Image (cartoon, rainbow, N blue to C red):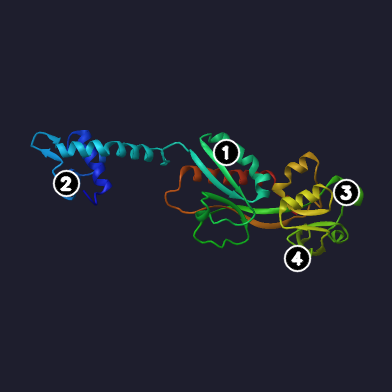
Amino acid sequence: MTDLHLDDLAVFVRVVDRGGFASAARELGTPTSTVSRAIARLESRAGVRLLQRTTRQMSPTSDGRELYGSIAPAVATLRATVQTLEPSSRQVRGRLRVTAPGDLCSGFLADVVVAFAERYPQVLLDFGVSNKPSNLVAEGFDVAVRASAKLDDSSLVARKLGEIEHGLYAAPRYHERHGSPTEPSQLMSQHTVVFRAKELSKTWTLHGPEGSSTWPLRGRIGGDDFTFVRGMVIAGGGIGLLPRFTCVADEASGRLLRVLPDYHARGATLYVLYPSRKHVPPRVTAFRDFVVDAFAAWSSRHAQPAP
């Protein structure tokens, strides 16, 4: 018995379970002729008759009973497994693998993820925290939250959250020792902590009441990770230009002070990314929509006042 199609075997089991072609066809949502052809195909490949048909009844032959006894449990297991998957009509659940940069996870996303977990208790959230772009398919991630000026992978589905706004911050201890500038030109005489600066040289473009202005700076401390830069600023290392969503809690607690609050800088664009538009699991769409709504609400609450 070779080259038997799994679909034909499943139809055979359904016919035996329901005691006839017509009832099996109704349950499968297919014409009776399709069921009949599947059984004929199966019998042809098996080389034996599996069902005895009369005008009034249908019953399995001895070979049919033997085959049914062998495959019916496996077919039932396969059906049960498929039913545990997440069609849109079922409850959101399952393991969700997410990749996101560290500064997002320790800032804006921390509250969002906890709220999402409370809203969807049957979803298990597994985060891969990395500042390097991940290959979602190769590394087995369901979704990514990523800040980028340009998306290089056109195979991914991207949902834009919005623009990341940066503000100038310093620690109270820095303010006590060095004071704070009252206009952007004074930044050039202050200690600064800079992000991704070649040889610690960095140009900050600020938008304020007089429009845009550009200030070339020489940083005192530099790093390639916003979490590190924020930590240096909190420790009193200097003034830093940081994503506002990473600093709201620190500003509220007094760990950070906003410097030149009328000025801000534009950062990268924040996206939610996932691999395909087809057959997207409900847990992925639920997480995507939850993050989109949360970022919109956050942006509305913390909008930079117009100059």
The kind of residue on which mark 4 rests is Lys
Which structural element holds mark 2? Answer: helix
- Mark 2 crowd level (few <14, some 14–19, many ≥20, 10 Å Cα): some
- Above or below: residue 265 compared with residue 89: below
- Mark 4 crowd level (few <14, some 14–19, many ≥20, 10 Å Cα): few
The kind of residue on which mark 2 rests is Glu
- Is residue 107 visible in the rendered image? The answer is no
- Above or below: residue 225 compared with residue 24: below
Q: Are marks 4 and 2 in contact (CB under 8 Å)?
A: no
The image shows residue 183 at horizontal and vertical percentages of 85, 57
User: Counting residues from the N terminus, which is met first, the one under dot 1 or under dot 3?
Assistant: 1
Q: CA distance from mark 3 to mark 4?
A: 26 Å
- Mark 1 crowd level (few <14, some 14–19, many ≥20, 10 Å Cα): some
- In this figure, which residue is indicated by the disc labeled 4? 198
The image shows residue 226 at horizontal and vertical percentages of 72, 53
The image shows residue 302 at horizontal and vertical percentages of 70, 45
* Mark sitting on residue 175: 3
Q: CA distance from mark 2 to mark 3?
A: 86 Å
